[in-house]
Image: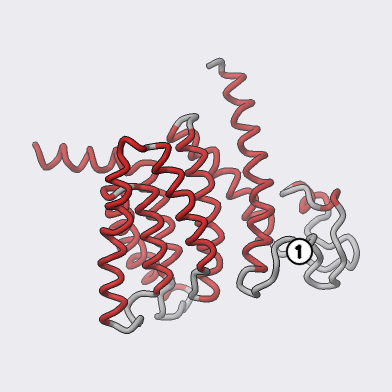
């Protein structure tokens, strides 16, 4: 593919990603409050409905200098950051995995994981609706990768069953029920090998990063596992097979 076409394609992917990112901000703000995601966006300070020309992802924030056109209140930096992050991660997905249906499904998965991460970090809860969306993506992945459907079905059980036992024995103190459902849905998307890798990565990242956060920012001892599981799932989806092959080669030699 010519370089010019490739660059144009990635620009389109980025623009599509930041548009979806704008919707993700709506979900992050409204789902924890049990609000509908359908009404038009409005200023969180004055309640004024935003016009279409004030809702261009990232660019409107820059043009308005981070303030509401109606009341002048500061707009949270979360909005452009989530929009830009979603666009950048979409590009990374397609660069790592190629242009195919799996990349489209991984992009959808990534967007859900962003929402899940933000909500779980703030509330220590993973809304059921997000795990249901991930399960639907997993079902679509089973259809797209039907030659490996057994791996996906096993993946939905192998980690989540272990976490369920841990949740049951600890009465929910060691792990949250949302985390159990998350890994079931993720396993359906990734298959058993990659979901195990995702869980291992999450445990390592969670231990290291949270200890650093506790030291630097006095973060709470209570750990929201959803963000680290999400990072592990994302890494495993894009580079997990290469990581597994590298590890197997080390063992064989």
Residue at the spot of label 1: 75
Q: Quadrant of the C terminus?
A: top left
Q: x and y percent of residue 191 in the render?
A: 32, 47
Q: x and y percent of residue 207 in the render?
A: 33, 67
Q: Is residue 44 left or right of residue 155?
A: right
Quadrant location of residue 78?
bottom right
Residue farthest to the top, as pictured: 2
- Above or below for 122 versus 244: below
Q: Is residue 112 left or right of residue 144?
A: right
Q: x and y percent of residue 239 in the render?
A: 35, 41
Total number of numbered labels? 1
Residue depicted at 47% across the width and 44% down the height: 106
| Residue neighbourhood size for the residue with mark 1, other residues' Cα within 10 Å, grouped as few (<14), some (14–19), many (≥20) | some
Residue depicted at 39% across the width and 75% down the height: 176
Looking at the image, what colour scheme do you see? secondary structure
- Above or below for 137 versus 67: above
Residue depicted at 50% across the width and 39% down the height: 92
Secondary element at image label 1: loop
Q: Nearer the viewer, residue 13 or 204?
A: 13
- Above or below for 57 versus 29: above
Q: Nearer the viewer, residue 184 or 25?
A: 184
- Above or below for 221 versus 14: below
Residue depicted at 65% across the width and 40% down the height: 16
Residue farthest to the right, as pictured: 70
């Amino acid at each position: 593919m010519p370089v010019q076409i490739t660059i144009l394609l990635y620009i389109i992917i980025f623009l599509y990603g930041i548009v979806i990112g704008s919707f993700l901000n709506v979900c992050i703000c409204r789902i924890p409050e049990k609000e509908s995601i359908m009404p038009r966006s409005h200023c969180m300070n004055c309640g004024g409905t935003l016009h279409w020309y004030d809702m261009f992802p990232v660019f409107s924030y820059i043009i308005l200098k981070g303030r509401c056109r109606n009341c002048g209140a500061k707009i949270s930096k979360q909005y452009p950051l989530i929009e830009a992050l979603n666009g950048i991660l979409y590009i990374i997905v397609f660069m790592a995995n190629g242009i195919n249906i799996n990349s489209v499904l991984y992009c959808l998965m990534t967007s859900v994981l962003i929402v899940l991460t933000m909500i779980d970090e703030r509330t220590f809860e993973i809304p059921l609706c997000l795990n249901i969306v991930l399960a639907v993506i997993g079902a679509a992945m089973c259809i797209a990768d039907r030659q490996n459907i057994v791996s996906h079905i096993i993946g939905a059980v192998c980690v989540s069953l272990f976490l369920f036992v841990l949740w049951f024995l600890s009465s929910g103190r060691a792990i949250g029920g949302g985390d159990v459902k998350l890994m079931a849905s993720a396993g359906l998307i990734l298959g058993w090998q990659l979901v195990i890798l995702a869980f291992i990565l999450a445990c390592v990242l969670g231990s290291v990063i949270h200890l650093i956060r506790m030291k630097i920012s006095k973060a709470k001892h209570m750990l929201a596992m959803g963000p680290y599981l999400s990072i592990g799932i994302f890494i495993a989806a894009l580079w997990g097979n290469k990581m597994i092959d590298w590890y197997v080669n080390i063992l064989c030699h």
